[in-house]
Amino acid sequence: MLLPVVPEGVVWAILLLPVASLLIIGFVTKPYPRLSGYVTIAAIGTAFLLSLWVLDSIIESDGHRLAFSSYEWVKVHTDNPVLQRLGGQSLEVRLALNIDGLSAVMLVVVTSVSLLVQVYSQGYMEHDGGYSRYFAWMSLFTAAMLGLLLFDSILMIYVFWELVGLGSYLLIGFWFHKPSAADAAKKAFLTTRLGDIGFLLAILLVWTKAGTFDIPVLQEMAHSGALSDTVITLFALGLFAGAVGKSAQFPLHVWLPDAMEGPTPVSALIHAATMVAAGVYLVARMFPVFQASDVAMTTVAYIGGFTAIFAASMGIVMTDIKRVLAYSTISQLGYMMLALGAGGYVAAIFHLFTHAYFKAMLFLGSGSVNHATGTFDMRKMGGLRRSMPITWATFLIGSLSLAGVFPLAGFWSKDEILGTVWHDDKLLFFVAMAVVFMTAFYSFRAVFMTFEGEYRGGEAPEHGNAHHGTPHESPWVMAAPLLVLAVPAALAGFTNVPNDSLQALGHLLHGSLPEESAHALHHAGFNAVIAAASTALALAGIALAWAIYVRRVVPADDLQRTFGPVHTLVARKYYMDELYEDVVVRRGLYAFATRAGQWFDTNVVDGAVNGAGALTRRAGDTLRWVQSGSVQAYGTVGFAGLVIASLLMLLLVER
Amino acid sequence: MSSVVLASVSLENVLVIGALLFSIGLYVSLSKRNAVGILMGVELMLNAVNVTFLAFSRYVESPRPLDGQVFAMFVIAIAAAEAAVALALAVAVYRHRETVNIDEIDLLRW
């Protein structure tokens, strides 16, 4: 409104600034850790300001896609007739920046959270030996995440999708000397790769059927019926498989809790606010394709709904504050998927938007607590409210927002999801309501166990700080980002207040869909009954947590004993890890695959090699007598050959 | 006088003689174990070819009637050179190994 329409170079700069930061750290400032941190902050800070400019232009264009020039990226022309007969098409991939309401909102989320996390990391990683490396990988991750949002080619999304996975791998395994961190990094990478296979197959399928990677064209085709229903459904399910991996949906959710082995700011940025939201973004970006397939929509809704309640149940029993937040993240991502599956395109992205802020803040808060007490185990915390007022206040705001208490951000987005689901599927609606209760319970269980009661010890901190005798508030460089994040965590909901003529966010997001898709969305207006019910449930959850963990009406230990087997089942994460590790990996893959591999190696590979050797040797033995070395014998055979040839000439050649 | 002889001796007769000589020479050179014997077989084959050359030269009309005879002269000259070299080799081998049996001269065989 105030600025001219954003030029193309500025959008490229948003992507290239973190790349430049990575290169500068790698080649220049690696020996000067402080400087590396400042370089990253400067790059991402600038990218954030430029993203605001982009957002401004998008508001001007009502969320519609900005016109940028399109480049020829790959061109392979097949003249070869053999290839053409085999069905080879000439490959031409064009590439353009794709800036619309959806990507502009995401750009602002990614750059703003990333900026605050980098500032926070200055304090959190202060004494870490790998300080420069940390900021280099953070820059890499941010660049990849921005690249994921910027282009209109699904192939390009895939490229950055994998780069984001790489950044996540490097940062989870940042303390790679710890075996648990190295294992968690591998687990995260392999588990998400499993989903990415589906994504890749979907891309290949759509290339053979539609011959394009262009997202707007694909969206158009999904609506015009240019692709058959089966193709659309398979395409959508393949994309969703990729999203299930990245967004840690059941059954590929197992990597996210383990990813908490990484430094806490990493968890805040990657495993709460941005990368895990990439799956939701992908489904939202390809939303018209999903709309065209009822099967895909139902799958998305049910997987999302199940993940939401499944993960929430585990969040209730975890004693590690970061794991509580991790399961909460999985659960909230399930919520977003549920919203998408129910047709709530705006509701899902709205929730993604608010969730990014309050969950990043909660993670940073848990890091701040860890900084003070040296542990993530809530059983060793308690009473921190007095010594860490800023952390307490922000954590409380985040938790209230997560629980969905009026008028904080989470209330508005959660309510929009509930309203949408109510219209789509009653069963899933009650699941979602149950999750509201559980969310409120586990988030306030964490608040009360951490900040109320008496201080219960602590431990040597994870990154080798000197031991702190008594917990104390974190330095300003860590507290300030918490305070800044508290603002959107509390107020982001007002960007999309229902029944408001503004509906700013929804308006922008609608603009990024093709006309037909936008019309097909049903608008769930504000439903006061649902809102009241969900708030009541949230307050009930908070009250229950208060009763158990503050007033100790029923001590938690007693409850745990009463529900012994159930508690064990949930605390062991429904034995999913054991199932995957022992049954699938060890018995299935190792036992079967290694045996099959060994059989193949000994019989086929060795057989081929040895067989070739034996054949040569036997042929040599057989033919050796021919080479007697006797010239007379050679002469005799030669003469005999001549005779035979002559006879044949006489007999066969007609004169 | 020559025409009388020619009348009773046809081209085929001479060629048969040549073929017989060649076959005998071939048999000798393939079957003998004595190196000198083999060389004698080779001489027989060379002379059988000479007979054939001369026969064709004499019996077949040609714009260049002397070609066959010139070839025969070449063969004789080369056969002489060959015999000289080969017999010298045979003598040299005999001095070393006290034998000219080719089955025993097998140094190059593995």
Image: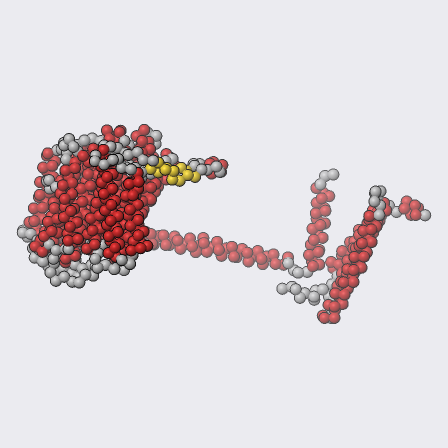
Q: Nearer the viewer, residue B41 or A116?
A: A116
> Residue A537's image quarter?
top left
Q: Quadrant location of the C terminus of chain A?
A: top right
> Residue A500's image quarter?
top left
Q: Considering only vertical position in the picture, is A627 above or below A194?
A: below
- In the image, A73: left or right of A385? right
Q: Quadrant location of the N terminus of chain A?
A: top left
Residue at point 15% right, 39% down?
Answer: A493
Residue A60 percent location from the top left of the image? 23, 33
Q: Considering only vertical position in the picture, is A538 above or below B45?
A: above
Residue at point 16% right, 40% down?
Answer: A492
For residue A503, say whether it is visible: yes
Q: Considering only vertical position in the picture, is A152 above or below A265?
A: above
Q: Considering only vertical position in the picture, is A147 above or below A66?
A: below
What kind of colouring is applied to the model shown? secondary structure
Residue B4 percent location from the top left of the image? 93, 46
For residue A563, say whether it is visible: no
Q: Nearer the viewer, residue A339 or B101?
A: A339
Residue A300 percent location from the top left of the image? 25, 39
Q: Nearer the viewer, residue A58 or A195?
A: A58
Residue at point 26% right, 54% down?
Answer: A36
Please tell me how many numbered marks the rendered image carries. Answer: 0
Residue at point 20% right, 33% down?
Answer: A507
Residue A50 percent location from the top left of the image? 25, 42
Q: Nearer the viewer, residue A35 or A498?
A: A35
